[in-house]
Amino acid sequence: MISLAHSVAFRGVEACLVEVQCSLSPGLPGFSIVGLPDKAVSEAKERVRAALSCMAIAFPSKKVTINLSPADLPKEGSHFDLPIALSLLAALEIIPPDSSQSIVALGELSLDGKIVPVTGALPAAMTAASEGLMLLCPEACGKEAAWVSDANVIAARTLGDVVRHFSGQVPIAPAQPGEVPTSPLSKDLSEVKGQERAKRALEIAAAGRHHIIFVGTPGSGKSMLAQRLPGILPPMTALEALETSMIHSIAGELDEGGISRDRPFRDPHHTSSMAAIIGGGRMAKPGEVSLAHNGVLFMDEFPEYPRNVLETLRQPLETAEVMVSRANAHVRYPCRFMLVAAANPCKCGYLPDPERACARVPKCGADYLGRISGPLMDRFDLRVDVPPVAYRDLDLPANGEKSATIAARVATARAVQQARFGERADMRTNADAEGEALEQIATPDPEGRDLLLRAAEKFNLSARGYHRVMRVARTIADLDGSEPVRRPHIAEAISFRLVSPVDA
């Protein structure tokens, strides 16, 4: 007799349907799993055997063969325990055989029969819904999986609960989505004293999802500014929240309850490896660029990152996706993030201060910032000099604009862009516009065009730099409530691209 259940194998954020077939045949007693399983899947037979024993279910004195189809798709992870146990229970007719065929199951089994939480419940629920199947998952994953509107999700605590559900003794109620958590704002931009130009640049960057780099002496407020960026960003849309949560689910970083509308803010240390930033490892897991999808990637001490790590950022910044290629896996992850970088002007940090600078000035500045290649620097839309704050300003009370006030203007500008781009998946903010679409929305008036052309010739802007100025000017016009892009908008956009110690 052949019994069937279903599970999923993960390939990036995609959950591929896997058919779990169980065969009981005469012969020497044994338990084998075939279909390209990894070590964790192969060890499932011991966990399943122990879980059945705890339920006083005798293991069959027959040859048990589990086939994971398609057989050429690698199967990784302990989440295959539950579907294997389910197909075996159906073969033993402990549960109705037809009931297991309409189930996509995932979950790890402990030796006492408890179902342990696993990663990937959200993409698994989406696959189950698209195939018209029910999802069976651990109790702790139910609130996450239930966010998929078309999915029928049941979440069980133990394997015994699963048996009682399918035998009709004690049905399990469908799982309900968890509450959307809201993070209270603990850091406000009004706490940053001075630095009005840097605050303005941060507002523009937030409004159009532009990449920005702060360059300034130690203690000037670069990190402080970046850490307050989440407070002025609008919450994610339902589609963005689902996209981001799928990546976090694969990475095992979703809290119980699941989806949040808060935009991710990732701040890796500058000693992070390429696999940590871009993605990779044995199972080609998502890296920081993908975990920051629809949010912010803050890279403090930017020149201190290894050169090869910095250079790998160039393609994701342009394409908004990253391909993690390994010998046994080629996985594509989305990474539409906003890069915020912070750097000192030189190794000692005091290049603009003659009294505190080292003896190698100005060569130390060129050498230090030279660690950031020209092509990578060209991808920053806004370059901001963050000068030291005067001591007398530190004694003044915080009287700047609060984050809520700035966030309202950012939200208004984002709403204009959402209406402008409609339902286009490839363009959501001004930073995404390119080609003909950019020409249509950001072509300046005659005076603005004349200024842009003269600036491009004088400062030798690249074609990429020229178009990035247009995108930033479009965002400034949106913040100003202006439909056409005018000369003042172009002038401000040019100023943020050129006035910086980076270009010194």
Image: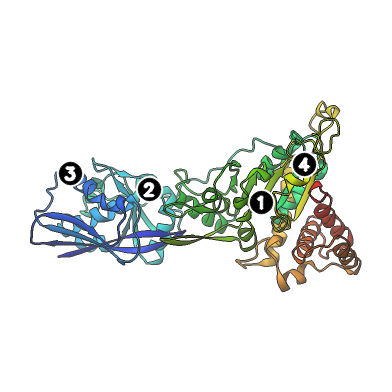
Q: Secondary structure at mark 2?
A: loop
Taking the spot 72% from the left edge, 50% from the top edge, the residue there is: 212
Seen from the viewer's position, the closer of residues 280 and 114 is 280
**Which residue in the structure is indicated by mark 1?**
339
Give the residue displayed 67% in from the left and 41% down from the top.
Answer: 301
The local secondary structure at tag 4 comes to: helix
Badge 2 crowding class, 10 Å Cα cut-off, few under 14, some 14 to 19, many 20 or more, is: some
Measured in 3D between alpha carbons, the distance from the residue under mark 4 to the one under mark 3, in whole angstroms, is 70 Å
Amino acid type, callout 2 = Val
Sequence-wise, the earlier of marks 1 and 3 is 3
Residue 428 picture location, percent across and down? 65, 62
Q: Are marks 4 and 3 in contact (CB under 8 Å)?
A: no
Residue with the mark numbered 4: 364
**Residue at the bottom extreme, as displayed:** 436
Q: Which residue is mark 3?
A: 55
Circle 1/circle 4 CB separation < 8 Å? no
Local packing at callout 4 (Cα closer than 10 Å; few below 14, some 14-19, many 20+) is some
Give the residue type that dot 4 points to.
Answer: Cys
In the picture of the structure, the residue carrying the numbered disc 2 is 118
Query: Which class describes the residues within 10 Å of circle 3: few (<14), some (14-19), or many (20+)?
Result: few
- Most extreme residue toward the top is 395
| Observer-nearest of 397 and 305 | 305
* Local secondary structure at mark 1: strand
> Which of pointers 1 and 3 indicates the residue nearer the eye?
1
Q: CA distance from mark 1 to mark 3?
A: 52 Å
